[in-house]
Image (tube, grey):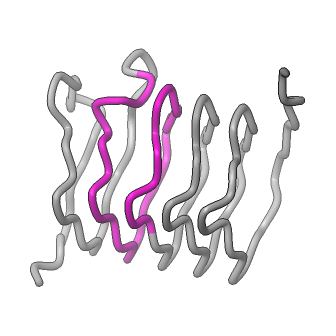
């Protein structure tokens, strides 16, 4: 069974819960996610291009094939994210004032990634 691909552009989502939900094969272009919960979400082959995540919770999402291209994470909580399972070809992100715990960036080219003001807990 193939899931349909939905392309969303320019949306602003606030306080949405994607916790334990599947966003498999979804495409988001130039979207803003404010105070959204992605805990345990299935992001298989999802694409987030030029998206901004503000104060979002990413606790243990499944990232196989997920694309974060020009993604900006601001004041987000990212726990147990296996970034090495993301689409390596287009991986480029910035992390500002985020909490990053138990995240794995192994085998990724971090040339197009910036880390600023990370919060230690």
- Eyeballing the image, is 36 above or below 71? below
Residue 85 versus residue 96: which sits nearer the camera?
A: 85
Q: Quadrant of the N terminus?
A: top right
Q: Position of residue 15 (x, y in %)?
A: 69, 83
Q: Position of residue 107 (x, y in %)?
A: 17, 22
Q: Quadrant of the C terminus?
A: bottom left
Q: Position of residue 89 (x, y in %)?
A: 41, 15
**Residue range (magenta):** 58-87
* Residue pictured at 61% horizontal, 75% vertical: 36
Look at the image and say whether residue 89 sits in the magenta stretch: no
Q: Position of residue 90 (x, y in %)?
A: 45, 22
Residue 24 versus residue 89: which sits nearer the camera?
A: 24
Image quadrant in which you'd find residue 45 = top right
Q: Return the residue found at the far left.
A: 120
Image quadrant in which you'd find residue 58 = bottom left
* Residue pictured at 61% horizontal, 41% vertical: 48
Give the side of residue 46 with respect to residue 101, left or right.
Answer: right
Look at the image and say whether residue 70 sits in the magenta stretch: yes
Image quadrant in which you'd find residue 37 = bottom right
* Residue pictured at 60% horizontal, 51% vertical: 51
Q: Return the residue found at the far top.
A: 89
Give the side of residue 6 with respect to residue 26, left or right.
Answer: right
- Eyeballing the image, is 105 above or below 115? above
Give the side of residue 115 with respect to residue 32, left or right.
Answer: left
């Amino acid at each position: 069974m193939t899931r349909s691909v939905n392309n969303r552009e320019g949306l602003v989502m606030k306080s949405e819960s994607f916790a334990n939900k599947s966003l498999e094969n979804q495409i988001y272009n130039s979207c803003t996610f404010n105070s959204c919960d992605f805990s345990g979400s299935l992001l298989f082959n999802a694409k987030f291009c030029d998206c901004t995540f503000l104060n979002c919770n990413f606790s243990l999402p499944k990232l196989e094939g997920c694309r974060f291209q020009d993604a900006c994470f601001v004041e987000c909580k990212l726990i147990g994210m296996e970034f090495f399972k993301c689409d390596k070809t287009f991986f480029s992100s910035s992390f500002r004032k985020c909490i990053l715990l138990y995240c794995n960036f192994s085998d990724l080219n971090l040339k197009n990634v910036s880390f600023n003001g990370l919060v230690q807990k």
